[in-house]
Amino acid sequence: MTMYGLRHPLLARTAAGAALIALVAGIPVILLIFFWPIDLPTIDDLATPGEPVVIKTLLLATVWACWALFALAVAVELVGAVRARRSQVRLPFQRLAAYLIATITVAATAPIAAPRDLIPAAAMAVTFTDMPEHTASAEPDKVETPKPYVSYVVQQRDTLWTIAEKRLGDPMRYQDIIALNQGRTMNDGRPFTRGEWLQPGCILHLPADAKQPEHARPRTHTVAPGDTLWGISKQHLGKGAQYKKIFKLNKGRPQPGGTRLSDPDVLEPGWRLILPKRGDDAQKAKPVHRRTLSQHTAQVTRRLPSSRLAEEPPHRRGLASRLISETGPRQWSLSEMVPPHLSTGSVVDFRAPRPSAEPAPRILGPNVEVASSEVVVLPQGGMMALSFAAGIAVALAATRLHRRRRLSAPAIDEPISVLAPEPQHPAVRALEHAHRNSDPEAARPDDLELVSSAFEIDPPLTLKAGILNDALVHLPLSGLHLALTGPGADDCIRAIVLDLLTQADAYRATVIIPVQDAERWFGDNLTTLVAYLPELCLTATLDEAVNHLEEQLVARHGLLQDYEADDIHQLRQAEPGEPLPALLLTASCPDGHSYLETLLGVSARLGLGAVLAGRTTSGTTCELDQNHRVTEASGPLTAELLGTALFHLPSDAASSMLHTLATGNGMPVDHPERPIDLPVPPSSATLRPVQFTLLGEPAIDVCGKPVDLSRRTKSLELFFLLALHPRGLDREVICEHLWPDLEETLAGYRFHAALKDLRTALRDASTPDDRNTHFIERSGKTYRIEAQHIDVDLWAFHQALAAARTATNQQEKLTALETAAALCQGQLGQGLRYDWLDQEHRWPLTIASIKALLQLGALNEQAGRNERALEVYDQACALDPDMESAARSAIRLLSALGRTDEARQRARHLKARLNTLGVNPSPETQTILQQLTAPH
């Protein structure tokens, strides 16, 4: 438990004070008592650094230096605490010093939010003041100055330290919160002081760079055979009688396989049901009429000809005109675009506009390194948010799952080879690399876990536009009216569209684009991808896109009236089963569009928005330079966007990413198969001293003794890389794989250190005769494994595949495949997290291994050895549970052997995994499943 985990402020202060005294005073006392005077080494001692007196002196010098730095950090923090200002000095150990001093000064005076039963009733009644509104005025160039702070509603057990850590990213900035709130009148009428308890419900002011809170993912339940809504409700909600809540949340929602829940008594295994939030009684709306969105849309009967739409005045007749006349055109402020549910326990941005005297912000060109950890700078140009990289990583995982699922069992005479990996665009590869390394300590999920964990139902509320002062800039999607112009406008629009498409699954968002603009931004092959991008709506012209937007606007306005909801967020809460995605229109509109601007003027509460290439008179227009930075802006979002470096994508990268999203949704890929033969050294009759296992969990045995390289991670990675390239690699290529982010000289030093550690570990475990062996030989700039001393199981596996391909009869082929099966103890480098291993080697080898196992199983079946064939099929399923052909072979054989119950159990497991991916079994699998369920 940390000191801030202590429930009583006096205990927290006592523990922190004791720790501070022990570190500041205890360390020098111990050193002076036990290690004084210091015996300094002589010149002769220094000539032999291994002498104990030299090591002792160095250790004592290190301890004294660390203590001095910590004492200085304590002094700096004490001065900052007395002055109530955060020190700008940064020293080693300053974070620890700040933590202890903050515990003493803050935890004892305002440690934790008081329990609710200790708060006066007046403190619980929180009054929220309406935010200022951008209204049209006679002076359009003047922008109302928002407040330069962020509001935060205190939750139970909040502390200034934890608030600063969660919202500002640095707990040492608690003093910034104190400085902003000192003397402020709180909700209960009392002024804020350092000695006050933080009361739940009170509103604190935070610095303007406070982060938005993360929203929890929805809870889901995957239906298993025998499940009922009553049982699911009792399991997750505590009472079976609350099954109606689950039914209401999921009624009519599309399920895997295209079916829908319509009867509470009928559930199918594999369905994924959304569960109510814990302790959340969904807001019950009282509908006047139970019309659906499609019924509302169908009532929009009047259509204006496309040729006249642009010229039609804003007061034109029809449902939309009546809606506009009722509400009136209006300029919506940023605060009004934020849904009401973000007002409690959340951060609301009141970012002030930049003063005109402030120097121009840093230009982020394509070759400029960005300091923010939330941004990915792409090779060959482009910059995107890290969350976008997660969406691309999920699409790549789904693509691999679809490809492996569609893999057919090979014929008995088909040659089996390891195929070359599919080429990836450098930008796509960089995004996947950034996602994999975003959390190095977290366990890396497999493809199915990654795809299933990305499931989300809530529509996106904001759009990540770019970066300003190393902080992400978020814009509200509802009511967004943004126009971009300048040399970088098209690149930024590509980024906006793709960022929304990565989070548009499950009816969460829809993007409307005229087909001419879509082909200009994403290429001519876009029309072939639309069938696999249901969230992308292409229209023939801009007028048709505006028509579609009008239909949605009128329909949603009718639904708001029916459910007596104030805005789209309340409507989604009242009717969670109704598909109400965020809707964004994107088009080229250089001269403006009067009727579109009129529609957007009333769209803020309806979940609709637009991003245009051109200019606008009622929204926000941004002028971009060649580096995609907003140099000029006019309109309601000027303060948020001026000086921002917008996210952007070049056309080739955007086309490749759109293709990746389509393949992730199941689009087949006609990738030419190109076998790659590993040039392995010839096998030897004598046993080599070093045995290196790559298939399965990596293992190194030297003369029968295991060698542990887990603490020498780069040495193991170097050994693994060289084993995959028997002919060797140049040092520059090795450094690009192992240290891609380091400068060439520094990477070279790291390489030689890793090589030395590897050779030392192998020599220490070798016999005296092999102590002078290099194990890794060098020829010019090329380094390779000495094949006469090291045997690699992967080389033997390739030799077995080659023998199977050249076999002259089935017995020779069977023998070679049995050798390959004995070597398949798992995936290549199981448990290792090397990016280059996943992208270039692991999955091609896994596919070849499973094909070899399926061919071996078929040969054993043909020879009447059914039990051995079943063992091989089980081995293939264990190697990759998502390979449908392997599971189908096992189910078919179990059924043929009369083991129907086992076959049905395997079939249910296969259907559940396919349902998670959102696909149906193949026709061959469907036939086998129908035979299992057919009455005998």
Image (cartoon, grey):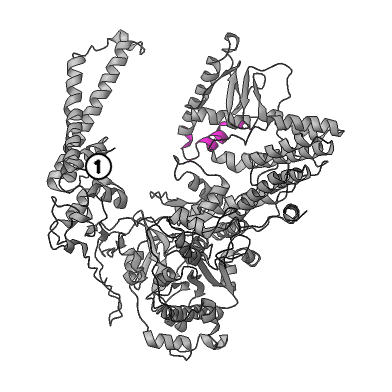
Is 686 left or right of 767, judged from the image as shown? right
Q: Is residue 220 above or below residue 325?
A: above
Of residues 506 and 210, the one drawn nearer to the viewer in this rendering: 506
Please name the residue that numbered disc 1 is placed on: 4
- Decide if residue 330 is in sight here: yes
**Mark 1 surroundings within 10 Å by alpha-carbon count, few (fewer than 14), some (14 through 19), many (20 or more):** many
**Image spot of residue 498 (x, y percent):** 52, 61
Q: Residue at x 68, y 57 (%)?
A: 668
Q: Is residue 371 shown above or below 356?
A: above
Magenta-colored stretch includes residue 923: no
User: Quadrant of residue 228 in the image?
Assistant: bottom right
Residue 742 covered by magenta stretch: yes
Circle 1: element type:
helix
Give the x, y percent position of residue 171. 27, 46
Q: Which one is nearer the viewer's eye here, 263 or 500?
A: 263
Start-end of magenta stretch: 724-745
